[in-house]
Amino acid sequence: MLRASMLPLLENLTSAQLDRVGQYPDGARFTFKELLEYRVQHVRDHLAQIARVKQAFREDKV
């Protein structure tokens, strides 16, 4: 669920880079890996939502 252009970059990250921690203004702290996993899941959730809406639309049209 990522852009294909990002794959070479992500495949070459070291463990140390994946474990780097960033902090949001609200104080929440995430490793790069955690943030990446969260964003991928977020996109998957949207895709599932789109599929549900499309299915509901099809069922209404029949």
Image: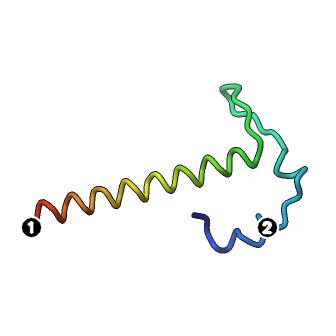
> Disc 1 residue type?
Val
Q: Is residue 26 left or right of residue 16?
A: left
> Disc 2 residue type?
Glu
Say above or below: 1 vs 46: below
Residue 12 is marked as none
Name the residue: 68% across, 45% down: 35
Q: Residue furthest top?
A: 27
Name the residue: 74% across, 49% down: 33
Say above or below: 13 vs 41: below
Helix, strand or loop under label 2: helix
Q: How is the image coloured?
A: rainbow
Quadrant of the rendered image containing residue 20: top right
Helix, strand or loop under label 1: loop
Q: Position of residue 19 (x, y in %)?
A: 84, 45
Name the residue: 56% across, 51% down: 41
Q: Residue furthest left?
A: 62
Name the residue: 31% across, 56% down: 52
| Neighbours of disc 2 within 10 Å: few (<14), some (14-19), many (20+) | few
Q: Is residue 62 left or right of residue 46?
A: left
Q: Earlier in the sequence, mark 2 or mark 1?
A: 2
Q: Quadrant of the image for the C terminus?
A: bottom left
- What residue is disc 2 on? 11
| Neighbours of disc 1 within 10 Å: few (<14), some (14-19), many (20+) | few
- What residue is disc 1 on? 62
Quadrant of the rendered image containing residue 58: bottom left
Q: Quadrant of the image for the N terminus?
A: bottom right
Viewer-nearest of discs 2 and 1: 1
Q: CA distance from mark 2 to mark 1?
A: 45 Å
Q: Is residue 47 left or right of residue 38?
A: left
